[in-house]
Image (cartoon, rainbow, N blue to C red):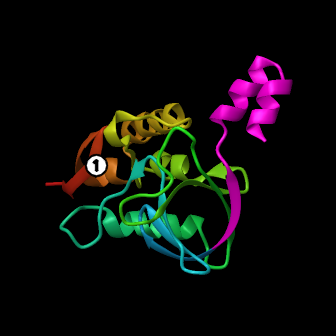
Amino acid sequence: MVVALCVTAPLTACAEAETMGSEDAAIVQRVADGDSIVLEGGARVRLLQIDAPELGEGECYGKDALEELERMLQPKGAIVLESDPRLDRVDRFQRLLRYVRVDDTNVNVELVRRGAATPYFRRGVRGRHAGALLDAADEARDERRGMWGSCRVSWSSNRQVETRPAR
């Protein structure tokens, strides 16, 4: 369909079609951790372009990040999964890599805005929501929200976040 659109539509429509990801409706079974969920049917999803502190590895804010995501995604709740054509669709653990939306809220961006996650651009590749993710991180850090006010945070957008309890 994109090929037909690009042949018959103006160049702006062709460029727009190439940057849009596919969208799929899904139902949440449970939240696995601060940046991963399990869908009804068992498919696992890693929220795209973010990283939350890990559970049980001595990191600060891992349990809090999980609880923040649980507040946003209720079991049996309807969500929209959005891929990004610039990025991988599946990770090495066979998890789907997706942005998650509830109504009009981009959950990935909102978790970063709340200080429960940071942007993570694997291999430096930035997806279409990179600007919003970076802006949300600046806002959370400046306002000392979530992990930024509770932990010592070591972060850059090209590596996973590390947190330690504040002294």
Q: Looking at the figure, which quarter contains the N terminus?
A: top right
Residue 32, visible in the rendered structure:
yes
Residue 135 left/right relative to 29: left
Q: In percent of the image, x 54 and y 79: which residue is there?
A: 42
Q: Which residue is mark 1?
A: 160
Q: In percent of the image, x 29 and y 55: which residue is there?
A: 150
Residue lying farthest left?
167
Q: Is residue 139 magenta?
A: no
Q: In percent of the image, x 66 and y 33: which residue is there?
A: 18
User: Where does residue 28 sit, x and y in percent of width and height?
Assistant: 61, 74
User: Where does residue 45 sit, x and y in percent of width and height?
Assistant: 50, 65
Helix, strand or loop for disc 1: strand
Residue 157, visible in the rendered structure:
no
Which segment is the magenta one?
A: 1-27
| Residue kind at label 1, given as amino acid type | Gln
Q: Looking at the figure, which quarter contains the C terminus?
A: bottom left
The foreground one among 80 and 73 is 80
Q: Is residue 22 magenta?
A: yes
Residue 24 left/right relative to 113: right
